[in-house]
Amino acid sequence: MFLKRQLNIQKRLHSGYADFNLDNSGMIAFDRRHSPKNIRYLMSCNFSAVAIDTTVFPANYSSAREHWLKKLSEQSGHSHHRPYPCIGVSGPDGEELVTDTVWIGAEDASRVLVLIGGTHGIEGFVGSAVQIDHLNLLACRHLTLPVDTAVLFIHALTPWGYAWQRRCDQDGVDLNRNIVDFSQPLPDNPGYDELRSVLFLDDGQRRKTALEAFERQHGRIALECALSGGQYSDPSGPFFGGNMPSHGRTVTEALMQHYSMKQRDLAVIDLHSGLGSFGYGEIICDHAPNSPATAVACQWYGESVTLPALGTSSSVPKTGLLDYAWHTIMNSKSCYITLEFGTFSTNQLFDILLHDHQLWAQQNNLQARLEHRTLMRHHFCPDDQAWKELVLFRARQVIAQALRGLSC
Ligand SMILES: [Zn+2]
């Protein structure tokens, strides 16, 4: 009987019309429309297998916001929208720039999934796509939240960078290097200081030669730490952590306080793109290797968790990560991961970013800056159907793992 039911279910899956969603027991419940008996079946993970629609990837920040707000209006249960305008700046077409947030589910839920998009502005394309996909799943009830669980969506945490298709904010600040104590001496990055003079060379070949020489002398990890580990001395350079809390940090701290996040069990997923293998969603954990939170991450997400501190990640250790703001309020049943969707090589990432910062360090070149957006967009969100499908599939898988992990 067991085997027969399993075969029937597989047949339905392969026929392409079976829908199922999660419930709190770790069981999969098939959509009643296709299953009059509402067959419930144990699976290893709660995962929505309804068709993947890549039109959730937006054309730009404005259309992403419009689509996101429209999907918000379709939610049937309790939802609470809190917008955080980015004051004093606008987008390339004069549009208002806002970090939108929504709480879906019971206000007093003791468990919360936090889904962050656009920590790095331009990576908001991926953030929007994943969030809109999940707003869709929730609205159509292909995904239902487990009991005592809510979800907080944070859309476009760095809206200026999203609208202008840059990684940083309007002050050149990388939010993901901004979580440091600005009342204390800021971290040093001697490798960055050593390389600074070559980073802005117009001659790409000379720059490449200098970086290769640094790598030969100090190793690849030292090179990547020097370039991308975070620096607090050069506002026009890449990976600049700033000298005061940025918009995204202020919003994050306001949300933590407003929703009393410290009192709840948290699964935080910060959506990024542009680093790692093409189409793969790497689960990066920046908790300390032997911490309870790392154990939680490994328990929820399995063998695919990587740790920069142990050298197992495509990311090197970094200063001032957004993670650290959340780490300080997390209990022993919570964890924070970066879900990083790979595209092209790390060398290409550095080339494109360095050129972006070169252009923005110059004056009177708006046209050149705007043209460079094409390359930025291509690196951080390639217009490739298979890549988009991989992103949405993997995001559903990881988010299902998080919801299941929170419930255990
Ligand atoms: Zn990123």
Image (cartoon, rainbow, N blue to C red):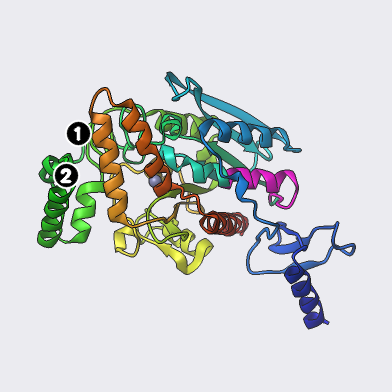
According to the image, label 1 marks what residue? 234
In this picture, is 91 found above or below 116?
above
- Asked if disc 1 is less than 8 Å from ligand 1, the answer is no
Q: Is 257 positioned to the left or the right of 110 in the image?
A: left
Q: Amino acid at mark 1?
A: Asp
Mark 2 neighbour density, 10 Å: few (under 14) some (14–19) many (20 or more): many
Q: Name the magenta segment's main secondary structure.
A: helix
Q: The magenta stretch spans which residues? A: 130-145
Q: In the depicted view, which residue is nearer to us: 342 or 7?
A: 342
* Residue 396 on the magenta span: no
In contact (CB < 8 Å): disc 2 and disc 1: yes
Say which residue appears at 73% left-offset and 71% top-offset.
14
Q: Amino acid at mark 2?
A: Tyr
At mark 1, the secondary structure is: loop
Q: Horizontal and vertical percent for residue 347?
A: 27, 54
Can residue 20 be seen in this snapshot? yes
Labels 2 and 1: the sequence-earlier one: 2
Say which residue appears at 43% left-offset and 33% top-offset.
158
